[in-house]
Image: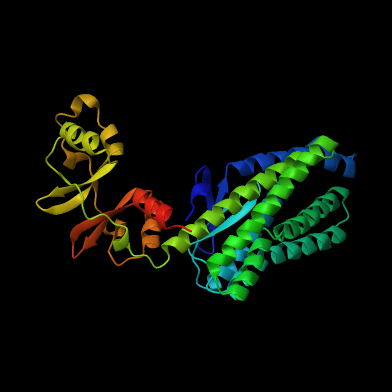
Amino acid sequence: MNSSLEHGSWKIGTVMGIPIRVHFSWLIIFGMITWSLSTFYFPKAAPQLPTLSFWVAGAIAAILLFVSVALHELAHSVIALRYRLPIVNITLYIFGGVSQMKAEPPDPGAELRIAVAGPLSSFVLSFLFLLLYFAVTGELARALFSYLAQLNLILGVFNLIPGFPMDGGRVVRAFIWKKSGDFFYATRKASGYGQKIALFFVFFGLFSLFAGLTGGLWLMLIGWFLHTAAQASYQQASLQQTLAGVKVRAIMTREIITMPSDMTVETAVNEYFLRYGYGGFPVMGKERFLGFVTLKEVKDVPRERWHEVKVSAILTPHDRRGEVSENDDALKALELMISEDQGRLAVMEQDKLTGLITRNGIAKYVQLMGR
């Protein structure tokens, strides 16, 4: 449900129907790898070659590492697709990649197979690059394939760290899930392990800095990232558990305040937005629900035109894809709001507006009922 990684990223292609996106942070690691290899690594491996060849080899190494990470995530996705789990996209960022699935695995066995597919692909790539290392004779080429073999081996081992949401943490969740029979309990436990391991990285990195050891800052950054991801996974599991089996009718509000479509923006602001303090209102025309007007649409209208522009001219028309029924799952409604970037949804029964369900309403319900 979390789409934060999509912000600051752009789509570069599609593989097997899965959009591949690159986060802007990947450019940082791409530049760092290219610079460090061309400045230090390759000049030592083949000092007789011109400087330009080092930079070309460095860029090729960074691109092939990029491809390796993408293949790692594609391996997860291929297995997930076998279980009919739709993949929203694969996003590559500074610390690796993420395959975003629309649903959770159906059982512990599926979770285990999906989790181990990524590290296995990295180990296979490491072996293939090792074979290429022995097959070529040029010093620069051997250095390139040696580097890629080592990096893929490290990538596979690193992802097996037993801290959720790393692949190793998902393996842990699969075993706890199988033993307990409770997916949410397993997720909370695995996320807790992930946070503890992340804190170990942070403190060990801090110790390394004071001890004058190399890599301390990177360990702290990785630990911070893992802790944030594990904490987000824990919160999401708690949210899913609280909303499991809860229907829209249990959270929706039936006492809705609607505004007529022929009202001016000025009247809407004075008599609705300022009076009730809500961020948006449903608009009705001839007893028919037309759509929503929110503060965003109001702000797009110049202040001097508020007295003449009608609400009907600025409303966001109702789309059936953005509605739910009283018997729909509340979790489905929340996922729809997130995917459509909406703060509220219309609850419709037989083409009539019967209520609203909002993010704030769901948040209050989770706060009261959460464990």
Q: Residue furthest toward the left?
A: 286
Q: State the residue in front, 278 or 348.
A: 278
Residue at (47% x, 63% y) in the render: 241
Residue at (74% x, 44% y) in the render: 203
> Is 344 drawn above or below residue 183 in the view shown?
above
Q: Where does residue 163 sit, x and y in percent of width and height?
A: 67, 58
Q: State the residue in front, 171 or 154.
A: 171
Q: How many marks?
A: 0
Residue at (72% x, 44% y) in the render: 202
Residue 186 sits in quarter? bottom right
Q: Where does residue 329 sit, x and y in percent of width and height?
A: 36, 65
Q: Where does residue 303 sit, x and y in percent of width and height?
A: 23, 26
Q: Left or right of 360: which side holds 305?
A: left
> Is 221 drawn above or below residue 84 in the view shown?
above
Q: State the residue in front, 216 or 136.
A: 216
Residue 80 sits in quarter? bottom right
Kindly tell me whether residue 318 is visible in this rendering.
yes
Q: Residue furthest toward the top?
A: 304
Q: Left or right of 124: which side holds 183?
A: left
Q: How is the image coloured?
A: rainbow
Kindly tell me whether residue 165 is visible in this rendering.
no
Residue at (74% x, 65% y) in the render: 124
